[in-house]
Image (tube, rainbow, N blue to C red):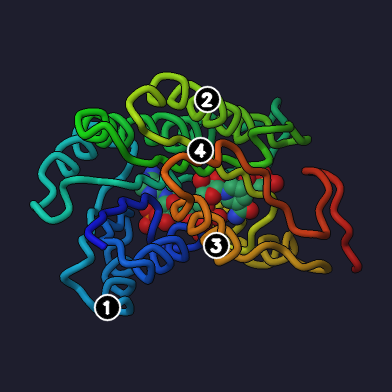
Amino acid sequence: MNKTALVTGASSGIGKAVSKTLFALGYNIVICGRREEKLEGLKKELGDESRVHTLLFDVRERAEVLRQIAELPGRFQKIDLLVNNAGNAHGLDPFQKGDLDDWDKMIDTNVKGLLYVSKAVVPGMAKRKGGMIINIGSIAGKEVYPMGNVYSASKFAVDAINQGMRLDLHSLGIRVGAINPGLVETEFSEVRFKGDEEKAGKVYQGYSPLQAEDIADLVKFMATRPAHVNIADVLILPTDQASSTVVNKKL
Ligand code: NDP
Ligand code: 8X3
């Protein structure tokens, strides 16, 4: 296969699992994130370093995102598959106690960062009249839960962007789809609770949460459909989860 995928947030969790899966499928991969040691570790783990390129940027840095993607070396320039995954929740507070810095981080990363990366990649796909974009949204982008306020807003925005992209890009042969996961055991809660490992660990106790590999499996399924099939929008939950607030915990 001579195809290239670019995955944001490849340094941990879902993005890392997706990168491994796409590499195993034969893609050349561009792995993006802020933590250099994690990306370099993944590159080594994958083995064939000639098929892996790392980009170190904060998706909130518009100029840096645009420049680094524009300057990708030849082999990695034509991106066939973009996985917009970088993102996090910051804080879990009632609206009246919300921290403005947390709100900025979520809107700037989950929404504006996704737009910057897409803006850097989509014109090439449009020119080549083909490609696939998978946007990682969330169940939080389908329903709001108490204290999820601004995180949910950022993921509702991802849902809207996913729909908007599909409407505008389908005539160019570009497939656009979203994966909206429920609870996945990653570093997500550690970030949300600002390094409080005990609090983060509790999120995944008493039931079987999704694993990052479950989402990677879905990416693989979407990426390997025949050209006439576009998986437009998927909600994927652990069996123990029925909604954002209904989780069958046996504690
Ligand atoms: P992780 O915290 O494990 O991974 C988040 C990834 O995003 C990291 O690789 C991180 O890389 C990257 N990232 C975060 N902020 C930035 C930034 N400003 N610039 C560049 N990269 C950034 O969490 P998940 O794997 O769980 O999260 C991946 C996506 O899945 C997110 O969009 C999240 O909202 C979504 N999601 C997660 C769910 C869950 O329950 N875990 C459920 C539903 C959706 P680095 O720190 O190196 O920059
Ligand atoms: C992550 C899942 O339920 O914490 O998007 O919002 S949740």
Quarter in which the N terminus is drawn? bottom left
Residue at the spot 75% in from the left edge and 64% down from the top edge: 202
Residue that numbered label 4 is attached to: 177
What residue does disc 2 label?
163
Q: Residues within 10 Å of mark 2 (few under 14, many from 20)?
A: some
Question: Distance between the Cα atoms at labels 3 and 2?
Answer: 22 Å
Q: Visible in this render: residue 189?
A: yes
Whichever of callouts 4 and 3 sits on the residue coming sooner in the sequence is 4
Q: Tell me if mark 4 has few (under 14), some (14-19) or many (20+) residues whose alpha carbon lies within 10 angstroms of its own.
A: many
* Real-space Cα separation, disc 2 to disc 4, in angstroms: 8 Å
> Disc 3 vs disc 1: which is toward the camera?
3
CB atoms of marks 3 and 2 within 8 Å: no
Q: Nearer the viewer, mark 2 or mark 1?
A: 2
Residue under label 3, please give it.
217
Query: Element under label 2?
Result: helix
Q: Is residue 73 left or right of residue 84?
A: left
Disc nearer the start of the sequence (3/2): 2
Separation of disc 2 and disc 1 at Cα? 36 Å
Whole-number angstrom distance, CA of label 4 to CA of label 1: 30 Å
Q: Is mark 3 within 8 Å of ligand 1?
A: no
* Image height of 151 relative to 15, above or below: above
CA–CA distance in space, label 3 to label 1: 22 Å
Task: Check mark 4 vs ligand 1: CB closer than 8 Å? yes or no.
Answer: no
Residue at image location 40% in from the left, 68% down from the top: 20
Q: Which residue is mark 1?
A: 44
> Which amino acid type is shown beneath numbered disc 3?
Asp
Which residue occupies the foreground of this view, 213 or 166? 166
